[in-house]
Image (spheres, rainbow, N blue to C red):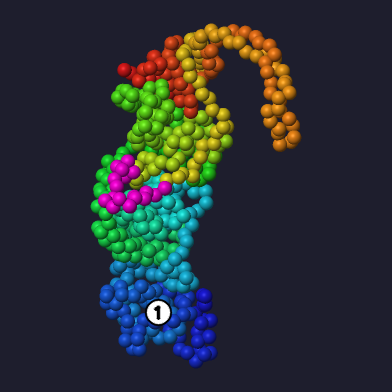
Amino acid sequence: MKLAISSVLALALAAGTASAAPEPWCGEGVADTFNVAMGNKFTYNSDADDLADDASFMRVVGASCSVMGHDNEQFHAQLAAARARWAKRLRMADADWADAAAWIQEPAGVRYSRTIHVPDHRAYSELGPIAQYALLSNEYVSAGIASYNADVLGAHLTETGRVGYVQSCLGGSIAAPAQWALCWADAEAIDLDKLAAELRSDKSYSGADRMFLRIAAYNLVTKLVPQRRDELAKADPAYRKLVEIAAKTRKDWSASPEALALVDALDDAVAKQSRSLHVDGCADNARAALLAQVAALPSTAFADMPLYPKKGDKDEEFRLAPTRLLATVAKTPDGYLAELAVVLCATDHDDATELATEVDRQIANSSGLRGPRTAALTAMKRSKIQPDARDEQISYPESRHAWVARGSGEHMWSTGVIKKLTRKGDVVHIVYDGKNVTATVCASWNDTNHVTAIRNDGTVQYQQVCGSYETLHGNDAPEPIDVSIADGGALKPGMVTLYTGGVMMAWAKRDDARPAVAFGLAIKK
């Protein structure tokens, strides 16, 4: 409840109670009493006193701003000394105490627990420090998705945003040491001085919000991080190994500026729900980026990529060659970013290409390589490290992404030996080779009186026998197809093709382990 000082004074005088003058930065003050003394002895006289009581800061601010009672007058010097100690801990300048005044006027239930919202229709690149905190501290978002969002912010990640990320990662309801390992480098890197400067400059949120974040960050650094450090030290050695893997992966991760710029713009478009940011030619640009990554693959990447998986090839789970190719491309940061761009271009559209829907199927549930944090999670999973205890399993955060490439549901599957290629403009017409075949088929059917079934509607079904036959002559060649020049330009007669999921591949011979064409590109030997 907020009351103007004049109103509070009137109430206090009417009740026969003397009022106190709040500190100048308190504004209208608060009409509450805050206990900072036992009798005439002030409670908070040292660091030990301050830190022994979780409510000490609230009581010191409240007593300094209260218009009820005599604390501010009787203990003026002690309150000033206590505020000075808290100002040092929370990195507060004199002007920041107005935020404390706004915070103390909030209802008691939201002073230490409040929800800060992300502005609607705001791109990642437009988020200020506190908005980044709101994005990354969302308790309903898994640490895997929070890691993706932190990676999207990239070099623009603020210290306030980092605090939100670490808070959600270390403070989750489920104790998951593998999750702590994922964000441990961020936990160790928090700089409260940087955070204080950011909060001071971010005027897009209230003073109460800024004060809440100072307190939350201080508690995170001085309480939760040390607690998790001790727990990791006592946990199975596997988790400390995961910390090492995550740290090394984060240090080694790198991507080209061009690849990052492409997906940064697209992630912004998705976050902002902007049609205009999905610029014309988006799908073509994303495909071009993907083709460049296919072309950049070393020749060894295609050494074992046959038309169909080998019998008993359990490691590849009988994945077809196009699926293997996409998985191979996604193993590098630039390759993953190119595939991600294909999906992001198709997000929120109802006419996604087959390629976009296939790539989405492969990467939507993966942690991926969007940045150093997601790369760390991927490396941790690939390490296949197991705890020493046989009955314990490592639990990793989920990475199900919100973006979805929605296609028409129609999928092209075509495979065969090329007989003839005809180009018309930007389209290549493929005619497949086949063998002439002769088959005898039934030309007419006759009913018998032998009942074979009675349907649910009572209809009786009788056995049928063939009444006459005819001989048909034909060719078993697959149906011809039309593909774009990008897919068909490198094809040659005699090659064996497989076109599925929007990916064209071809082999010089059916039993070759190495393709001659991948994604429409001729592969160097």
Q: Does residue 128 appear in the picture of this structure?
A: no
Quadrant in the picture for the C terminus: top left
Q: Does residue 497 appear in the picture of this structure?
A: yes
Residue 35 rendering spot, x and y as whole percentages: 39, 82
On the rendered structure, is 110 left or right of 185?
A: right
- Residue at 50 percent across and 13 percent down: it is 432
- Residue at 50 percent across and 53 percent down: it is 119
Hey, what amino acid is under mark 1?
Answer: Ala
On the rendered structure, is 201 left or right of 475?
A: left
Q: Which residue is mark 1?
A: 63
Magenta-tinted stretch: 380-398
Against 107, residue 509 (above or below) is above
- Residue at 43 percent across and 74 percent down: it is 26
On the rendered structure, is 193 left or right of 337?
A: left
Residue 474 rendering spot, x and y as whole percentages: 58, 9
As for residue 91 lying within the magenta part, the answer is no
- Residue at 35 percent across and 52 percent down: it is 179
Q: Residue furthest front?
A: 450
Foreground residue among 92 and 318: 318
Q: Residue furthest bottom?
A: 16
Circle count: 1
As for residue 396 lying within the magenta part, the answer is yes
Against 403, residue 173 (above or below) is below
Instruction: Name the element at disc 1.
Output: helix
Foreground residue among 314 and 398: 314
Residue 125 rendering spot, x and y as whole percentages: 43, 46
Residue 77, quarter of the rendered image: bottom left
| Magenta span: chief secondary structure | loop
